[in-house]
Amino acid sequence: MSVPKKSPAAATDTQSFAQRLASLETIVRNMESGELPLEAALTAYAEGMQLLQACQGALQQAEQTVVMLNQQQQLVPFDPE
């Protein structure tokens, strides 16, 4: 399988978290297959690292938002009844 030709940094700017995660999973599968030539594997690794950093950043931002909302007591406890 081939690695996408567009710039990884540009791709992560326009993708949602779910799209980034799906792209990262595809890269992992491709690399685990052992069928990528060395140059393609290195390119895929670099793209994967950028996607991983973008995903981690999004998760950290979401966590900070949740903490801030909890501190402002804007979240209402769920009542299943």
Image (cartoon, rainbow, N blue to C red):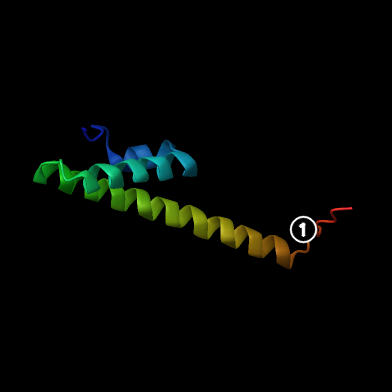
x%, y% of residue 78?
Answer: 81, 56
Please give left or right for residue 55 compared with residue 74 in the image. left
Residue depicted at x 32% and y 50%: 50
Q: Residue furthest front?
A: 33
Q: Residue furthest bottom?
A: 71
Residue depicted at x 44% and y 57%: 56
Q: Amino acid at mark 1?
A: Leu
Residue depicted at x 33% and y 41%: 26
* Residue at the disc numbered 1: 75
Observer-nearest of 54 and 35: 35
What is the secondary structure assignment of the residue under circle 1?
Answer: loop
x%, y% of residue 54?
Answer: 40, 51
Occupied quadrant, residue 70:
bottom right
Answer few, some or many: residues within 10 Å of disc 1's Cα (few below 14, many 20 plus, some between 14 and 19). Answer: few
Quadrant that contains the N terminus: top left
x%, y% of residue 42?
Answer: 16, 48
Observer-nearest of 54 and 31: 31
Give the number of callouts: 1
Compared with 18, 55 (above or below) is below
Please give left or right for residue 70 compared with residue 20 in the image. right
Q: Residue furthest right?
A: 81
Please give left or right for residue 79 compared with residue 54 in the image. right
